[in-house]
Image (spheres, rainbow, N blue to C red):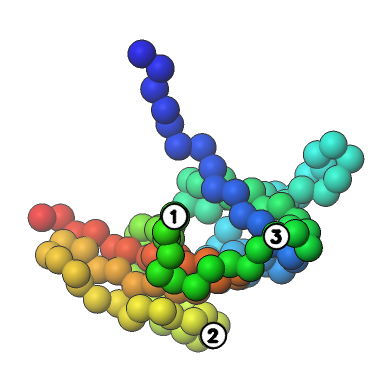
């Protein structure tokens, strides 16, 4: 039987360079620039995840305001200390939509707002 495996996230942005710079500066993403069909392409590698950024045009709708149906957010596990990551991001002016908290034993989470209203969860898991 065929099996699926996760491959990538695809983002649309009116300013792919600015979006890539945010992910690089705030979260340490590796920015990968290339050409595809004669046009510049910007990809990111972050936490083992490929993120493709495409230039949006005037027909693209604005990002919705949460809560909404569909993909709500994506999350990255923080290794080496959520509190240290939070302090670093706050010093850089990142907007937190949820402060760090423990919704259940064994996990701490928080949410930040990325470019184009992207909701990003940062989480730290602890052994049960």
**Mark 3 and mark 1: span between their CA atoms?**
17 Å
Label for residue 49? none
Residue at the image position 42 percent from the left and 59 percent from the top: 69
Query: Where does residue 46 sit, x and y in percent of width and height?
Result: 53, 53
| In the image, farthest residue toward the right | 38
Q: Is residue 39 above or below residue 63?
A: above
**Mark 2 and mark 3: span between their CA atoms?**
28 Å
Which SS class for mark 1? loop
- Residue named by callout 3: 60
Please state which of residues 56 and 88 is positioned toward the viewer in this rendering: 56
Residue at the image position 75 percent from the left and 59 percent from the top: 59
Q: Residues within 10 Å of mark 3 (few under 14, many from 20)?
A: few
Q: Is residue 81 left or right of residue 13?
A: left
Query: Where does residue 7 sit, x and y in percent of width and height?
Result: 51, 37
- Residue named by callout 2: 93
Q: Earlier in the sequence, mark 2 or mark 3?
A: 3
**Mark 2 and mark 1: span between their CA atoms?**
28 Å
Q: Is residue 107 left or right of residue 100?
A: left
Q: Is residue 75 left or right of residue 52?
A: left
Residue at the image position 63 percent from the left and 68 percent from the top: 62
Q: Residues within 10 Å of mark 1 (few under 14, many from 20)?
A: few
Q: Is residue 44 above or below residue 16?
A: above
- Residue named by callout 1: 70
Nearest-to-viewer mark from 2 and 3 = 3
Q: Earlier in the sequence, mark 2 or mark 1?
A: 1
Residue 67 in view in this figure: yes
Query: Where does residue 97 sit, x and y in percent of width and height?
Result: 41, 79
Q: Quadrant of residue 34?
A: top right
Q: Is residue 1 above or below residue 12?
A: above
| In the image, farthest residue toward the top | 1
């Amino acid at each position: 039987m065929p099996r699926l495996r996760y491959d990538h996230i695809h983002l649309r942005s009116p300013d792919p360079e600015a979006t890539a710079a945010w992910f690089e500066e705030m979260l340490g993403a590796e920015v990968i620039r290339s050409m595809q069909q004669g046009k510049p392409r910007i990809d990111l590698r972050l936490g083992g995840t490929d993120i493709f950024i495409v230039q949006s045009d005037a027909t693209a709708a604005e990002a919705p305001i949460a809560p909404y149906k569909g993909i709500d957010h994506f999350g990255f596990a923080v290794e080496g200390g959520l509190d240290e990551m939070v302090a670093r991001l706050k010093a850089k002016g990142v907007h937190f939509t949820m402060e760090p908290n423990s919704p259940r034993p064994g996990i701490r989470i928080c949410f930040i707002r990325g470019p184009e209203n992207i909701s990003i969860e940062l989480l730290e898991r602890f052994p049960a």
